[in-house]
Amino acid sequence: MRWVRILVATLCAFAPARYAMAQTLDDLAYETVEPSRIKLGESAILRVTSFGRIKDVTLPIIPGLVFEPLGRSQGFDFVNGATLPATFFSIRITPQFAGVFTIPGLTPSSRPVGLEVVKGDEPNPYTWHSQQPTPAPVPTGTLPKGVQLQAGGAAFVHLAIPARPIYVGESVPVEIDVGLRAGIVTAVNGLPTLKGSDFTFNNLSKQPERRQESIDGGTFILLSWHSALAAVKPGEFELSAEAPLTVKMSTLSAADRAIASRLAYPLLQSMYSGVAPKDMTIESSPLQLKVLPLPMEGQPENFSGAVGNFRVSSEVSPASVAAGEPLTLRLHISGAGNFDRVDSTMFDHLDHWKTYPAKSSFTPSDAVGNEGEKVFEQPLIAAQPGEQSIPGLEFAYFNPNTRQYEHAQTPAIKVTVAPALASGLSLSGAPATGSALGLRPDHRVPQNSASELRPLYFRPSFLIIPTTLALLLAGSWFAVRANAARANSKGARKVLAQLDAAARAGDSSAFFTAARNALLQRFAAQWRMPADQITVADLRARLGATGEDLERLFAIADETRYSDHQSGGADFQRWISLIRGQLSSERK
Amino acid sequence: MRTAKIPMVIAVIALWAGQVLAQPTQPTQLSPSPSPSPSPSPSPSPPTYSADGLYNLANAYARAGKPGLAVLSYERAALLAPADPDINANLAYVRASAHVPMKPLSRFARLVGTTSPAAAAWLGILGIALVGIGLVASRAAPRFLWIPRGGVLLGIALIALAASNAMLLWPHMHEAVILVDQAPARVSPAPMADTAFALREAESVTMTAEYEDFILIRTGGGLTGWVSRASLGAVVPSD
């Protein structure tokens, strides 16, 4: 009884202090997902516990997960042994496909949690099924050599790499094992990563292998990821792996834990056992890896950087074609190594065949793409009929097992090439209908070529020509017009001078004859008709009242021409005035 | 008459100089190049095109099961020789085999298309010369006016023929052919943008704008979207 009184007195003394500590955690919130591993088709419950004044949470948007709020409730939660008022949000999570998901913190202070969704046919040890047989006992295992537990004994990371030296460019498999103590590690917050800047890592498996083992008396979930590693330069390097986790950690001090361990009653123990989730990253022990340079001695000229152990084979289809028709040469390269350095340079020596760019495809046979088969498809066209031979293809690579360069060669392949068809060539992939016209045959040797596909009239250099031509012709048109005007003016002055001279001499015949001829030439040019076809009717129709005067002038001209009639000087001046007016008038 | 000879001499000189300047003769292309478009690698000589060479190249692509490249080469060959029956027949056949609809040509288009663009261009030049010379001659020499008037009418007809040919080919200047099957047309010029619709290989589209590695295209049905530059080939390569 004495101990009980001491205990009660101690609790009473510590309670106010602990309550004050809890008040400082007003913003504290955490979330849990239960169960953290479910089958596709099942649902998990995300529970957000907030000790602050958060009224609601915003549901995240994660592809593959459907969130459905179930409700909000008030209650109490135990923190560090203190009972604090809390708000609980319950959210149902229904996955749409399998995978490892990270659900972000829904409150500012809560941490992300992980959810693993497995396919329906995989066993789920966390789901209780009354009709299933009792699960097999967990096998007993040991920690890998050189590996120590971290996070207070809750987890470990182990990196497995080849113990032998590797060569530059060589692709070697690596394995990352993460051990998680069941019930302590609440989430894996992402894929593990390798630390090392002098390496390339490829194809880290998205879905880890999973198994359970009993290690050091505790149940551990072992997750194994696989990847391929390649070194980019020679030397000795350190390599390690790390993984982000969320672990339930005790927040009690050593003294508090000692007190808690002495509490006899489970209720009091639970009140006194402060546990909170904590994000952390655990790292494996660094490993030394020696990277050797590729030997320069004996390196083939056609070596493209492929390192590994490969086998090659080839085939061609169809085995007989018509000249001009394509056939496909397939080169199969299988084995293990850095397939990304296996290229199509071996097709460069098909000199007697017309080739097009080869296509390639890679089919891995392991999870990381270190083993598999790469197939190159090379279209070939034979120009000449007859028995043709496709030469053997040689592939050079460095074998790290034998530590020397090796050659893999395919045998030559015989192909029968028939004479070219005149017409009716069928299009590959086209529907083989009997009424199909097929392709018309090739043309003979091209005769003409152009430097540009753009038609002439769309080229700026060509447009200079019609522009220049149009300008030249327009200039000519105006020049001809000006010349005609000048010629008319000069001719008019000449005619008027003749008329003046005839008038002064009193020569009526010369005067009217010159006037008649000048006017007829003027009207012929103006009306665009021959001068000898201009009639009196034309004068009346085109000139009106003036035409009557001119008709009289023409009549006097005829009269003086045939009867030698002489007119007075006053008449000459009037006629000269009339003629000057006609010769100087603008063309209509 | 002396004034009428001057523009004729000028026109003849201009035609001769234009032919020399605008159509330099290139070496004959003996075999089709494996790459229909100018190679990205530096080339010492500019690419040359011939209708027959492009036609043979298109045939090779068609036989190799590459309808996109085949249609592109046929379209380019048709630019140089639009009246070639083999080109048009094989183009129609490859398009039909690739299940790409082909718009039927109007009678006017067929009529105008019988003249090659090069011939139409020079006929247009001849038309301009005839119109100009006819006008100048009719002003300079009023006699026999039916001759210059007939020349003017013939010139106008030739200019109309060249203009119609140019109008017919103008859409091809911005035309492109899809080179990969199910090429995504995206709503914006970004690789991660949503796909609006997919384009069939060998389908012809009109290029309306470009932004970095994407080209805004419009299909014959009026759909628009951004397509990766690598997924299509312009019928008339840009300089």
Image (tube, coloured by chain):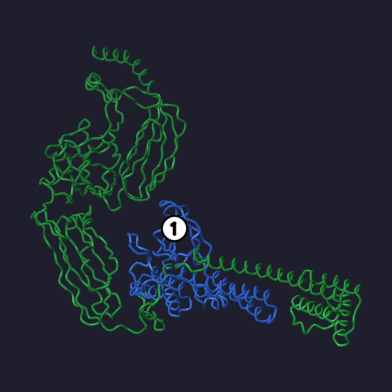
Chain colours: A green, B blue
Q: Position of residue B208 (x, y in %)?
A: 51, 59
Residue sticking out furthest to the left: A402
Residue plotted at (42% across, 64% down): B178
Q: Quadrant of the N terminus of chain B?
A: bottom right
Q: Quadrant of residue A576?
A: bottom right
Q: Quadrant of residue A213?
A: top left
Q: Is residue B231 above or below residue B116?
A: above
Residue topped by disc 1: B227
- Horizontal arrangement in the rendering, residue A489 relative to residue A314 (left or right): right
Answer whether residue B124 is visible to the viewer in this image. no
Please name the amino acid that badge 1 sits on: Val
Answer whether residue B236 is visible to the viewer in this image. yes
Q: Position of residue B106 (x, y in %)?
A: 56, 76
Name the residue nearer the viewer: A242 or A133. A242
Q: Quadrant of the C terminus of chain B?
A: bottom left
Name the residue nearer the viewer: B162 or A99. B162
Q: Position of residue B233 (x, y in %)?
A: 42, 63
Name the residue nearer the viewer: B168 or A252. B168
- Which chain is disc 1 placed on? B
Q: Position of residue A272 (x, y in %)?
A: 29, 22
Q: Is residue B12 above or below residue B230?
A: below
Q: Classify mark 1: residues with Cα within 10 Å, few (<14), some (14-19) or many (20+).
A: many
- Horizontal arrangement in the rendering, residue A445 relative to residue A409 (left or right): right
Identify the element where label 1 is drawn: strand
Q: How many marks?
A: 1
